[in-house]
Image: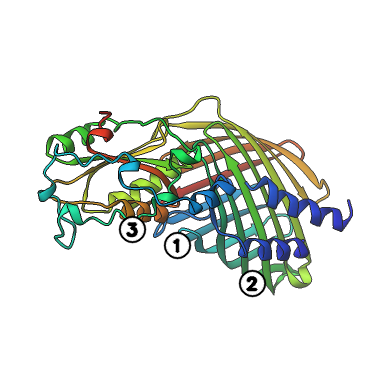
Amino acid sequence: MTSRAVTTGFALIAMFLCVSASARPVSYTGGWTVIETSNRASTAGLLHYTAAYNLSIGARYEWQRGSDTRLKAIQPTFLAKRWFGKDYQGNLYLTGGFGKANRGVDGSSISETASFAGVMADWETRSLFVSYEGRQLNLGKFGNQTMHAARLGWAPYEGDTGALHTWLMLEVDHRKHFDKTTSITPLLRFFKGPALLEIGYNLSDSSPLFNFTYRF
Amino acid sequence: MNKAITFIIATLLSAPAWSDHGNEAADHHAKPEMSHADMGHDHSDEHDHASHETESDAPHASHDHSGANHSDMGHDAHGMTMANASITHTDDIMTALTNGGEPVVVDVLGVVCDFCATAMNKIFGKRDEVAALYVDLDKKTLSLVINEGASLSDKQIEKLAKKAGYRIAAIRRDSEAMGG
C-alpha cells in the first residue's frame, strides 16, 4: 500500500466513519479516568483529567516490552466531534503527546525526546460497536512507529443501567515495525458502572490482551 | 500519516464539535424558536409554583425557559421523536416524589452505555436541587426529582447535560413527566 493510499484511507475513515475509542479518552467535566492497556506491543497506563467536555489532559507511561523502551509523556486528548442520535453515539478524538523515552543500550540507559499524534474514532449503539485508532510515535534515534487498529463489537444482550454489560469483539491491528505486521485479537469486554475490563488473546503473536478503565 | 493528521485537524477545527443528525441541526436553527408550550411542558397547578425557588430565590415563574434554545433540542419537528417516556420508578425517585419533589424527564441523545449513565449521575448528582435521579438506558431518559422549593431550569439542565458530554432532545415536567 502506498503512503498516499494510507493517507487517503486514514482521512476517509476519520471523516466518514465518523465514529470513538474503546476507553472513551475524554470523560465528563471534572472527572478522572485511569486506563491500563496491555497488548502484544506494550503495557501502558494513562491517568487523565477531563477539564471540559471536549478536552482531557493526562500523564502516560508506556513500556514497549520488545525493545525495553519506556515512554513518559503528557497526553492531551481533544474530542473533535461527537455525533448524537436517539440510539447511537459517534466520536472523533485527536490526541498527542510529548515526553521522554528511555532505552537500555549496552548496559546504560539512553534518553530521547518522544512525541506522538493520533486519532481515534468510534460509533456505537447498545449492541454494535465500530472503532478505529491510529498513532504515529516518534522516538528520535530509536525510530518511528506507526500503528493502526480497528475493532468490531457485538453485545449479545442489552444490559440495564448498572448491570453487567458484555461485548464480543474482534480487533485487527497493523504495526509496521513488527515481524508480524498484522494481527487479530478476539476479546471479551465487560462493562459495569464506572469500570470496563477487556480480556483477549492475540492469535498471531500468541500474547494476551488485558485492558482496564475506571472513571471516578 | 502526518499529512493525514494535519488534514483532519484542519477540517475538524472548521466544523462544530457537536452535531445531531448532521444537516438536521442546521435546519432547526433556521426554524422559529418553539414556544415553551410546544415542548409539552405542563406547568399546571398540580404543584405549588410559588414554592419553587431558584438559587437566587426567584419564583418558579421567572425560570429562564427562553434561555434554553429549544429549537436546538431536537424536538419532534426534526424527526427526533422519542416516545414520551414517563419517569422511571426507582425507590429513591418514589421517595423523593412522596416528599413533594417535582418530576422531570429528560430525553437524552447518545446514551448508549454505562459510562454515559455514570457521567450523568456524577454531574447531576452533585446538584443540591436534585433529590433523586436515574439514567434509563432503555428509554434513553434521565429521570430527575427536583427538591421541593428548588428548581432547575431547562437551560440549566441543558448545560449540565453538556458538561456530562451529552445533548438533550426534550424535557417534560410534572404530569407529563408522570405519564399523564
Q: Quick check: marks 2 and 3 in contact, CB under 8 Å?
A: no
Q: How many residues crowd around disc 2 within 10 Å: few (fewer than 14), some, or many (20 or more)? A: some
What residue is at 30 percent from the left and 43 percent from the top? B37
Q: How far apart are marks 1 and 2 (CA)?
A: 27 Å
Please give the label number shown on residue B67.
Answer: 3
* Viewer-nearest of discs 2 and 3: 3
The amino acid type of the residue labelled 2 equals Lys
- Quarter of image, res A151: top right
Task: Say which amino acid is labelled 3.
Answer: Gly
Q: Quadrant of the N terminus of chain B?
A: bottom right
User: Is A92 situated left or right of B152 in this image?
Assistant: right
**Sequence-wise, which precedes: disc 1 or disc 2?**
1
Question: Would you identify the image quadrant in which residue A65 lies?
Answer: bottom right
Contact? badges 1 and 3 (CB < 8 Å): no
Q: Nearer the viewer, mark 1 or mark 3?
A: 3
Q: What element carries label 3?
A: loop
* Rendered residue at 25%/52% (across/down): B152
- The spot of residue B70 in percent (x, y) is 39, 50
Residue assigned mark 1:
A52
Q: Which colour scheme is used?
A: rainbow
Q: Which residue matches tag 2? A: A100
